[in-house]
Amino acid sequence: LGLGSKDRIDLRIQQSITRVLTRQAPNGAFGLWGAYSGDAWLDAYVTDFLSRARAAGYTVPDIAFRNALDNLKNEIAYAADFDDGGEDIAYALMVLAREGEAAMGDLRYYADERADNFATPLAQAQLGAALAAYGDQPRADALFSKAAARIALRPPAEGQVYRADYGSRLRDTAGVLSLAVEARSDSID
């Protein structure tokens, strides 16, 4: 891919971590161009990056990472109920669950009461992955099945469609499959 040697890649990832952290607000949230808050999906995305980098052995300062996780917890605690949406909630719960920081009650509530209200199949799969991380495979499999069915039934969008989670049908499909494999779900054919 022309990315360079392992040392070069390691340097680029560490530089990316440093740069991302310059955009962290005091409350633990992240901004695109500066240290501000207001985009919960972006907060989950950046925290996911930091979590995966940390798990791979890269240096992520403890205080910055703790603040990022605390911010996601606060966003979940104060999240408004929704009839259509929740992409940010599902992503935050998945990241928190991978770190052992999600509340099982929240995961079950969203799975049992709001599963059909998530706006995208990827959000359903992210919630499924969170449940699988906590050992609730039956609920996880049910969510992966719902996500796969929505992808199969949903026609491609006409033209460019803006989404709050910066997503597309292609990303949803790839994400659902990837998360199902990670969660060891056999509910997707």
Image: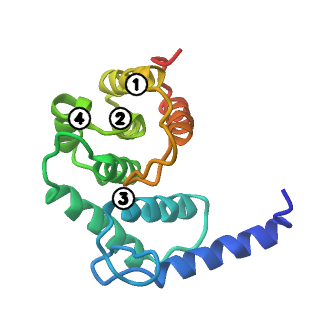
Residue receiving disc 3: 41
N-term mark: 4 or 2: 4
Q: Residue 142's x, y, as percent? A: 33, 21
Q: CA distance from mark 3 to mark 4?
A: 17 Å
Helix, strand or loop under label 3: helix
Helix, strand or loop under label 4: helix
Residue at image coords 81%, 64%: 3
Q: Please name which of the two marks, 1 or 3, marks the residue nearer to the observer.
A: 1
Badge 2 amino acid:
Gln
Displayed quadrant of residue 19? bottom right
Does residue 149 sit above or below 78 in this rendering? above
Q: Say few, some or many: other residues with alpha carbon within 10 Å of mark 3 (under 14 / 14 to 19 / 20 or more).
A: many
Q: CA distance from mark 4 to mark 1?
A: 12 Å
Residue receiving disc 1: 150
Callout 2–callout 1 Cβ contact below 8 Å = yes
Residue receiving disc 2: 124
Q: Say few, some or many: other residues with alpha carbon within 10 Å of mark 4 (under 14 / 14 to 19 / 20 or more).
A: some
Q: Residue 111's x, y, as percent? A: 24, 32
Does residue 148 sit above or below 120 in this rendering? above
Q: Residue 57's x, y, as percent? A: 61, 64
Residue 114 is left or right of residue 5, and the answer is left
Q: CA distance from mark 3 to mark 2?
A: 14 Å
Badge 1 amino acid:
Arg
Residue receiving disc 4: 117
